[in-house]
Image (cartoon, rainbow, N blue to C red):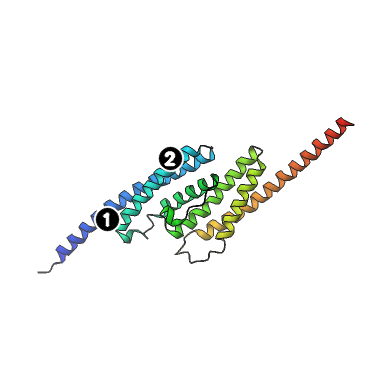
Amino acid sequence: MTRISEIVAEVDQELLVKEEIREKILELTRIAVRSSSQAINSAHNGDLTTARKHLEKAREAVHQVNSLVEQHPDLKYSGLLNQAHQEFTEASVFIALLEGKDVPSPSELGVMGALYLTGLADVIGELRRLCVDCLRRDDFQGAEQAFKLMEEIYSALRYVDHPKALIPGLRQKCDSARRMIEDTRGMLTMVLQRIKLRDSINTLIRKLEES
């Protein structure tokens, strides 16, 4: 008589436990992603106090996820962490930039390095949105600052060259970021030309009024 049935039953029980943990991770990931998104939206709306509250909720969810995978290391590289770590990184870095604070590192956020980089690449899109919002408010200086940050992040990431298996999606994100930067540069150039033209017209009007 073999022990096959006993072994199968034992493994099956282990998998049942792991499935429960996987479901809990997915639930926490949804919380982290949703809270990170809410933090970014609040930041864009100028409500950094609320943004920080959402960010803290995302942080708690990410830390809980990390604790769960520490108990089951095989789940760490299964892809379950990807979205939570990326979205939390994006929100954390974006809000730090808005507040003029030091950008947090992967270890400070408790996220994996590769996922930190892909999350960092997504910050460029949020800075593009900020740049456009600044231009709508006639805040050209703010738009220029946002654009400089876009360029700084892209310049840091563009030379990161590792296999797709190690950093999935980074090349595509950088390609998209390059197009955004080129488009934003063109937009800023046009606005600057309009500002100069407006200033020249106003100067001419004043001179005519004084003469």
Instruction: Look at the image and tell me in which quarter the C terminus lies.
Output: top right
**Foreground tag (1 vs 2):** 2
In this orientation, which residue lies closer to the viewer: 23 or 195?
195
Q: Is 204 placed left or right of 191 in the picture? A: right
Most distant residue in the bottom direction: 1
Q: Is residue 191 left or right of residue 96?
A: right
Q: Which residue is mark 1?
A: 18
Q: Quadrant of the N terminus?
A: bottom left
Mark 1 and mark 2 residues within 8 Å of each other at the beta carbon: no
Task: Please tell me which residue is depicted at 45% across the width and 59% down the height of the picture.
Answer: 113
Residue at image mark 2: 53
Amino acid type, mark 2: Lys
Disc 1/disc 2 C-alpha distance (Å)? 31 Å
Left or right: 56, with 193 as reference point = left
Residue type at mark 1? Lys
Residue 104: x and y, percent?
Answer: 48, 52
Q: Is residue 71 above or below residue 203?
A: below
SS at mark 1? helix
The residue tagged with tag 2: helix, strand or loop? helix
The x and y percentages for residue 12 are: 21, 58
Q: Hey, which residue is sitting farthest top in the picture?
A: 209
- Image coords of residue 179 (percent x, y): 61, 54
Q: Specify few, some or many for label 2: CA neighbours under 10 Å numbering under 14, 14-19, or 20 or more.
A: some
Most extreme residue toward the front, as rendered? 101
207 up-or-down from 165: above or below: above
Which label's residue is closer to the chain start, 1 or 2? 1
The residue located at (16%, 66%) in the rendering is: 4
> Is 151 left or right of 40, judged from the image as shown?
right
